[in-house]
Image: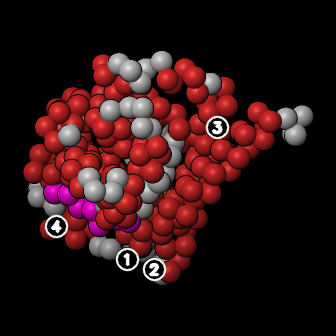
């Protein structure tokens, strides 16, 4: 049975997603552990505005400094919440970090040679989505939906900084890694079960192609450093639809939903991911109409 072509394809896709995600998950947990063990809580209160509505765009723009994918952003956002950062600001950072960091933007430029407007469109649409979701959480989010992540909070009396770093890294990596595997398995199952001919039915409709590629980004679960090359290969779809693929993917996909469920709770992940998908698709349509 393991030699069957479908099983071999599933195994290949599953392995590829895990191999893509684990290095950046490790990067994220290392950054999370450094924040937890070595960065005093007062640093965040001084860097971010006290008003959550003002802290959201600052945190969203700060996403440009983390060179990782969505697997890295979840543990970092959890660590920020544990250190007292407003959830709305941490969530804005969670969404923007894998979408607007320099590695992703350079990869987009390489994937779409001679089309710098696609890079600008991705940057603007992604930042617009992350800030809008942060403000939406302030307006409509409820505390009971969000399970604050557990784990070492840092600066435990009597413990060395090195020991706090080790405990935090161990906790976050092992906890998030299991959910990464679950998400990768779900994405691989979709890749094998759904024939590619189904996708071609939507490419001719400008109204259906955009949400279709938005859904495709969710289930393919491509790392944000590589999704621009996948989008560039979808030549049958419009530039705006391919933009939606690149905006949605780093913010909502199966492995990310699984990671959010394990870190913040299933009730939060379902609501937040659904709203993020809608906002990301609308932002892509607006920015694509403007720039592309």
The residues tagged by marks 1 and 4 sit, at their Cα atoms, a distance apart of 16 Å
On the image, numbered disc 2 is attached to which residue?
A: 161
On the image, numbered disc 4 is attached to which residue?
A: 47
Magenta part, dominant SS: helix
Residue 252 placement (x, y as % from top left): 41, 38
Name the residue located 45 percent from the left edge and 62 percent from the top edge. 28
In this view, the residue in front, 19 or 9, is: 9
Q: Secondary structure at mark 3?
A: helix
- Give the mark, 2 or 4, whose residue is nearer the N terminus: 4
Q: Contact, CB < 8 Å: mark 2 with mark 1?
A: yes
On the image, numbered disc 3 is attached to which residue?
A: 188
Q: Quadrant of the C terminus?
A: top left
- Give the mark, 1 or 4, whose residue is nearer the N terminus: 1
Compared to 187, does 115 lie above or below? below
Name the residue located 57 percent from the left edge and 56 percent from the top edge. 20
How dense is the environment of label 1, judged by Cα within 10 Å: few (below 14), some, or many (20 and up)?
some
Disc nearest the viewer among 1 and 4? 4
How dense is the environment of label 3, judged by Cα within 10 Å: few (below 14), some, or many (20 and up)?
many
Image quarter of residue 279:
top left
Q: Contact, CB < 8 Å: mark 3 with mark 2?
A: no
- Give the mark, 3 or 2, whose residue is nearer the N terminus: 2
On the image, numbered disc 1 is attached to which residue?
A: 38
Q: Secondary structure at mark 4?
A: helix
Disc nearest the viewer among 2 and 4? 4
Residue 249 placement (x, y as % from top left): 41, 42
Disc nearest the viewer among 1 and 3? 3
The residues tagged by marks 3 and 2 sit, at their Cα atoms, a distance apart of 40 Å
Compared to 117, does 156 lie above or below? below
Image quarter of residue 205:
top left
């Amino acid at each position: 049975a393991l030699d069957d072509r479908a099983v071999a394809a599933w195994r290949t896709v599953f392995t590829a997603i895990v191999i893509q995600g684990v290095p950046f998950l490790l990067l994220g947990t290392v950054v999370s552990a450094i924040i937890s063990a070595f960065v005093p809580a007062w640093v965040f209160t001084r860097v971010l505005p006290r008003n959550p509505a003002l802290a959201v765009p600052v945190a969203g723009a700060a996403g440009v400094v983390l060179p990782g994918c969505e697997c890295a952003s979840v543990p970092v956002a959890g660590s920020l919440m544990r250190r007292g950062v407003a959830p709305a600001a941490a969530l804005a950072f969670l969404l923007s970090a894998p979408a607007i960091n320099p590695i992703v933007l350079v990869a987009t430029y390489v994937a779409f040679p001679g089309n710098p407007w696609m890079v600008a469109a991705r940057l603007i649409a992604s930042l617009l989505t992350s800030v809008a979701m942060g403000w939406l959480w302030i307006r409509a989010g409820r505390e009971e939906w969000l399970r604050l992540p557990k784990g070492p909070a840092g600066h435990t009396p009597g413990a060395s900084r090195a020991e706090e770093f080790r405990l935090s890294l161990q906790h976050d990596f092992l906890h998030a890694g299991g959910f990464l595997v679950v998400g990768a398995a779900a994405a691989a199952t979709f890749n094998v079960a759904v024939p590619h001919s189904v996708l071609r039915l939507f490419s001719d409709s400008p109204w259906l192609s955009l949400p279709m590629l938005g859904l495709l980004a969710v289930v393919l679960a491509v790392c944000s450093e590589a999704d621009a090359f996948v989008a560039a290969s979808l030549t049958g779809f419009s530039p705006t639809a391919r933009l939606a693929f690149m905006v949605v993917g780093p913010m909502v996909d199966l492995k990310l939903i699984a990671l959010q469920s394990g870190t913040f709770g299933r009730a939060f992940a379902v609501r937040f991911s659904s709203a993020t998908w809608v906002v990301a698709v609308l932002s892509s349509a607006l920015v694509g109409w403007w720039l592309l």
